[in-house]
Each structure stands twice: as C-alpha cells, then as structure tokens.
Image (cartoon, rainbow, N blue to C red):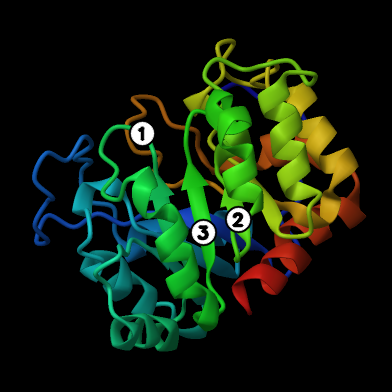
Amino acid sequence: MSPRHEAEPARFPPGACDTHVHFYDGRHPVAPGAFLRPPDATVDDYRMIAVELGLDRLVVVQPTTYGLDNTCQLDAMAAFDDAARGVMVVDDNTDDSELARLTDLGVRGARFHMLPGGAVPWEMLDVVARRIAPFGWHIQLQLNGRDLYERGDQLLRLPVDLVVDHVGRFMPPVDIDHPSFETLLDVVESGRGWVKLSAPYESSVIGPPGYDDLLPLVDALVARAPDRVLWATNWPHPGQTDPPGAADLARLADRWFPDAGILHRVLVDNPAELYDF
C-alpha cells in the first residue's frame, strides 16, 4: 500500500485497543477440514506491531484454524495479562462451568463465523446466545453482509449484544441504501449492536491503499453510530498474500477517523465499554 499523503499519521491515543487479533502456533493441532492454515504468528511478533502503532490493549479472537479448541488463543491472551480480552468459539455442548472459566480468563464473546471453515452453524446461534447471556458475553458474527437482511429479525432478537465483523464484510461492497446495509445500521442503532471497521481487503474490489469502495459505508457508520464502532488490525491478516503494514493501517485509520474525538471514542472508549477494560 502506498501512502495517502506524505505526512505520517499520529500514533494512536493512550488506551487504544485492537479488537481483532489472531495467533497461530504450529504446536497446536489444526481442526479437521480447516480452511486456513497460516504460518506461526506469535505474541512477540504482535508486540512489534502494537508498539509501532501505540496499541495498549487487544482482543484475541479464535480463528477458524483451531475449530472449538481455544487453547492457542487463551495461551496468547495470558501473555498480555489484563490488557487482553478474548472472543472464543463455544457451542451448545459447552457447559456453564467452562463458560465461567473462560469468563475468569477474560473472554467476553462467542464467535460465529458463517463462511467456509466456521465451526458452529446458524442453528446454534440462538441457543448459544441464551447460554452466554448470564455471563455478560456478546455474539461476534462474521458473514457475507449481503445476508444480513434475511437474518435481520433473528439478529435483532438476540438477548445479547452483537458485534458484526469487517465493515459488515459485504462481498462485493454494496451501496448505502442496500437493504442489508440498512439492516446493519438497524443493528448498530438498536443499542445492542456494534460493528468492527477492519479488514477492508476481505470485501473491497478496488483494493489498497484506500479501499475507496468501502469508504461510503465507513463514513455512514461513523456518522450514524460513532458510539457503536470499533477498530481492529485483523493481524496477522490470514489469507492475505500482501498484508498491510503498521503504517498502512495507521493511514487508513487516519482517513476513516479524521476527528481526534471520534478516533479516541472508537479506539479507546467504545472497546473499553464492550470488553470491560
């Protein structure tokens, strides 16, 4: 990615949180039929990116590579002490004692990945949501955002907060008046919904440096619901052959959040509320 302008963007404000990070370690078994098998990505590797950007907190998200075995991500979380929270994969067989254990370790959400490689199907969404509600968790959902309209009623009825990944991951991007984008706006404006502005390469057709086909969606979300927007690196960018570097990510955030007050809200205040920092 080439620079948007010559000036380097400022480091992020103190307390800034990266809300979507994965770790990979070849010592942990890969789930049968795993769709992605990235190379190792370690705590030390991530610390370098975090220092460069000025990130103080992170949310470790279970990748599809490990299915229902959250061990690799929990081990990584432990290395960051109270600066880390987690979003793990559980299903309808996960009992309350395990949910309590994960909560004590800093887990605050259950991930549903509705694309190839996901470990938990749509049929379990409602029951898992009911199971995690007493623990204060949320549902984190990744899907082709074009499916949001047909799922809207179900998602708005969930008894927990809902976090939608990657600018909705509309593949390909939609106009802001598309019914599924309007559903995403309904979710984030419901008081129980959030959206991560992250991984634009997962849906953009135009591509870097600006992913300009996503900019209208980003602008609409920030304008309509600034208190329900999160930001993330999606490090180490699994599946990407030419991933963005730290400076690229900072420039993109600079474009998405040109106002310092909005930047602080999105990177510090919003994740502190959702993830209980």
Residue in the picture at 29% in, 43% down: 118
The residue wearing badge 3 is 139
- Quadrant including the C terminus: bottom right
Disc 1/disc 2 C-alpha distance (Å): 17 Å
Percent position of residue 151, x then y: 56, 36
Q: Secondary structure at mark 1?
A: loop
Disc 2/disc 3 C-alpha distance (Å): 5 Å
Residue in the picture at 58% in, 40% down: 198
Q: Are marks 2 and 3 in contact (CB under 8 Å)?
A: yes
Q: Are marks 3 and 1 in contact (CB under 8 Å)?
A: no
Tag 3: Cα neighbours inside 10 Å, few (<14), some, or many (≥20)?
many
Circle 1: residue type: Leu
Residue in the picture at 44% in, 47% down: 235
Residue 134 visible from this viewpoint: yes
Left or right: 178 as drawn, with respect to 82: right
Closer to the camera, 105 or 46? 105
The residue wearing badge 1 is 115
Circle 3: residue type: Ile
Q: Secondary structure at mark 2?
A: strand
- The tag earlier along the polypeptide, 1 or 2, is 1
The residue wearing badge 2 is 162
Percent position of residue 165, x then y: 55, 43
Closer to the camera, 127 or 60? 127
